[in-house]
Amino acid sequence: MKLQSLIASVASIGLAALGIANANKIVLSGDTNIAGGLPGGEQVDAGSQQFFLNVLGAGANVAVQDTTAQSVTDDAELINDFYSSQAGVTSTLLSNMAVLDATVLSGLDLFVSLVPDDDYSAAELNALSNFVSGGGVLFLLADNNNFPTQNGRINTLLASLGSSMSVVPNTVFDFGFQTATGGQIGVGALTAGVSSFTYAAPSELAVGMGAEQLLFGTGGQLFMASEGFVSGPEVPLPAAPLLFASGFAALYASRKRKD
């Protein structure tokens, strides 16, 4: 392959990678009780509210799918009410029976699902994949070892999306409402401006190298992570192929001058 062709190929790979960096945005929580930090919750917390705003970002259209899971229905309503209270934001509480298809997901910037009641059909998995790959944000809230079936459904969805994140089965820690501060809060796009965060008795999460680890329990257990969010002012990793390509270009130009 000629050097010019190699440079073009590498550059094109870099551009494709940069495109991916702004899509596939998934947030995974090991706890539904994080809604307790929102207005009307058990332990209202400004940092928790900032986190939920960071997840929405510049979005304006939200849907929160309700659940019949005991003690979690109030959390779905708290999240929906919080987003509805934001200026310029429309949030809808979907029935737990709602079929997730292109019609339901169309126009949404953020879709929130708490411990889903039913298995995802193949059509729903496909619709959610299209939603995420199209730039929508998917916020999934699992819970502790009292919800093994629901957590398993979330893991099935994550696997179908090619996510490196999952809920560790049959785990629970930090009983009762807690406030994460200091070293329990990781650095990422979603924790900007977050100095405290409310949670209670979550499941632990497992993540791959591409995920941002955001919130930790008192023993260092990860319970909040995300993929696809660009954090900090540094150059995102997917830009590396472009830098590599530009180095090739400089090398080629230098060689041409010598010739």
Image (cartoon, rainbow, N blue to C red):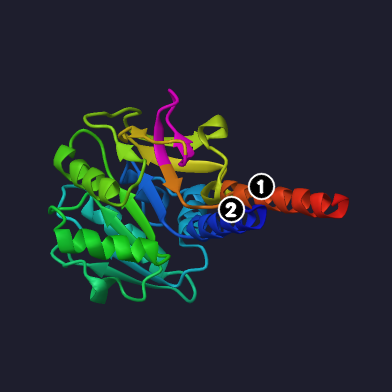
Measuring 36% from the left and 54% from the top, which residue is drawn there?
139
Q: Is residue 234 visible?
A: no
Indicate the position of residue 195 as horizontal and vertical percent values.
57, 42
Is there any visible trace of residue 25 in the rendered image? yes
SS type, badge 2: helix
Magenta stretch holds residue 59: no
C-alpha gap between disc 2 and disc 1: 8 Å
For residue 52, side relative to residue 187 (left or right): left
Q: In this view, does 88 lie to the left or right of 157?
A: right
Q: What stretch is highlighted in magenta?
A: 210-224
Q: Residues within 10 Å of mark 2 (few under 14, many from 20)?
A: some
Q: Which amino acid does label 2 sit on?
A: Val
Q: What residue type is labelled 1?
A: Phe
In the image, 236: left or right of 54? Answer: right
Q: In this view, does 194 lie above or below 137?
A: above
Asked whether the residues under the numbered discs 2 and 1 touch, taking CB atoms below 8 Å apart as contact, a structural biologist would say yes
